[in-house]
Image: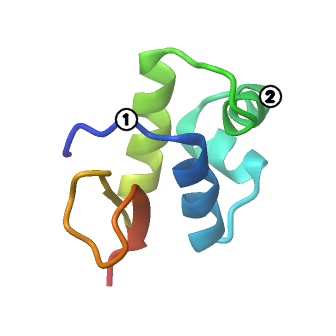
Amino acid sequence: MKDIKLTPAQCKMARSALAWGVRDLAEKSQIGSATISRFEGGKGVNTSTLSALTKAFVEHGIRFIADDEASLEGGPGVRLKK
């Protein structure tokens, strides 16, 4: 898995792409829903939390796009694998 720094916006976009609520992500990542909500609200979380969230998304088909990765519009984002 490519080492990325998950942003709150990417977390929200990835949840939306998978039609997951915060509780769904909490279950799949084993991270508390309050922690996920704080992160998505802009509060910092530790590296292990970011890794667990990222792993859960990648295991369910999300591909993250880094800020410096080629894309039409630029900037960080997400893409759902086919």
- Quickly name the residue at label 1: 5
Locate residue 11 relative to residue 41 in the image: left or right.
left
Q: Is residue 69 above or below residue 42?
A: below
What is the quadrant of the C terminus in the image?
bottom left
Residue 81 in which image quadrant: bottom left
Locate residue 44 relative to residue 61 in the image: left or right.
right
Q: Position of residue 18 (x, y in %)?
A: 58, 70
Secondary structure at numbered mark 1 = loop
Q: Is residue 63 above or below residue 33?
A: below
Q: Residue furthest bottom?
A: 82
Q: Residue furthest top?
A: 46
Give the residue at x 77% y 36%: 37
Numbered label attached to residue 34: 2
Give the residue at x 38% y 43%: 55
Q: Position of residue 63 (x, y in %)?
A: 33, 63
Residue 30 in which image quadrant: top right
Locate residue 48 relative to residue 32 in the image: left or right.
left
Type of residue at label 1?
Lys
Which of disc 1 and disc 2 is earlier in sequence? 1
Q: Is residue 33 visible?
A: yes
Neighbours of disc 2 within 10 Å: few (<14), some (14-19), many (20+): few
Secondary structure at numbered mark 2 = helix
Q: Position of residue 42 (x, y in %)?
A: 69, 31
